[in-house]
Amino acid sequence: MTQQNKRLRSVVKGVGSALPQRCVSNRELEQTVDTSDEWIVQRTGIKQRYIAGEGETTSTLGAAAARAALAKAECAAEDIDLIICATSTPDYTFPSSATMIQAELGITKGVAFDLQAVCAGFVFAVATADKFLISGSHKRALVIGSETFSRILDWQDRTTCVLFGDGAGAIVLEAQESEAPEGSESDRGVLTSHLRSDGRHRAKLYVDGGPSTTQTAGHLRMEGKEVFRFAVGHVTDVMRDAFAATGVTADDLDWFVPHQANRRIIDASAQKLGIAPEKVVTTVQYHGNTSAASIPLALAVACEDGRIKRGDLVMIEAIGGGFTWGAAIIRW
Ligand code: UT7
């Protein structure tokens, strides 16, 4: 009977993050683009963002975040056999940033690859790593979200350039055997994940270049209002799916850690699902929208300041270009 109830869970062992050295305030942006601190704060909640300088890239930031996560997890780099780096801004078209991070960490075994689902990338990467780990094929994963969106922004376009920032976050996930009753407080790990995509929305959020079209990296283009509408109107479906799959309710959640694009989207989504405002982790004011890095950066802040603790129920959720969107519930 006990044997039958044994299952593998992907348990979070540690979280880490890394930011570029240079912090750019809204006031500083006022000097170069026709905008105002007041507009940016009112419309988005963003007060500052970090912008990568010379020598700071998606792989260097990702490696720094990974090192920090390994230290928190008290895990040696050589014990990692799976690295997934969620990014839309890789150092190069190839090789993947994940393999660059792997080499930087001195890891020579296992597998490393990038995953591209834009701002939903970290949720997609957690879901993917979880499926590897619970299959028994791999034991310990580094799941990284790392971005340098500043390098694909059109700095003349005030409707997009004020919104994004650079940074990286990472978690260590470990496959652990659990005999705890499903859904109980000792049943730790990724409890469920739900991913969606719908390519019909491509033109609302895209980059206007790429190797196979323009042979350039291109610049980010966005119909902000349309993305906003979709984010608030539709994305709650995956969160409802996550609740239905686990029996967890909004009241049961300890923390809601959504993608950090816009404070108004975060607040509206939480309200729609009945999640109390004090359970919402918001870091968009510090980092701006860092795409796939935003959730692990927020997780790192909330773990560091003692909000997220072992045993807490945490929901992560994001939407990105494509559109792609997803949610997961994790017992910390
Ligand atoms: O991470 C991927 C997902 N991305 C998102 O979730 C972003 C979703 N969208 C949004 O967050 C919001 O739509 C924005 C923050 C991008 C824009 O907010 P909005 O309330 O939808 O503003 P808007 O686009 O309707 O623009 C309102 C006004 C316009 O002026 P008019 O036409 O009313 O005269 C814009 O030209 O604000 C103007 N505007 C600005 N003004 C000062 C646009 N950008 C700026 C700016 N500074 N940076």
Image (cartoon, grey):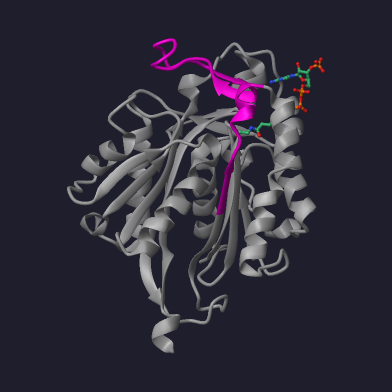
What residue sits 58% from the left and 61% below the top? 314
Residue 101 in percent (x, y) is at 28, 40
Indicate left or right for 168 with 105 as reference: right
Q: Quadrant of ligand 1?
A: top right
Foreground residue among 186 and 183: 183
Q: Is residue 135 magenta?
A: no
On the image, which quarter does residue 241 sit in?
A: bottom right
Residue that appears at 65% across and 17% down: 158
Residue 275 visible, this orientation:
yes
Quarter residue 215 falls in: top left
Q: Which residues are drawn in magenta? A: 194-222
Horizontal side of 152 relative to 108 (left or right) equals right
Residue 208 falls within the magenta-colored stretch = yes
Q: How many labels, in total?
A: 0
- Residue 205 at what x, y percent from top left? 61, 25
Residue at (55% x, 37% y) in the render: 119
- Where, by quadrant of the figure, is residue 193 drawn? bottom right
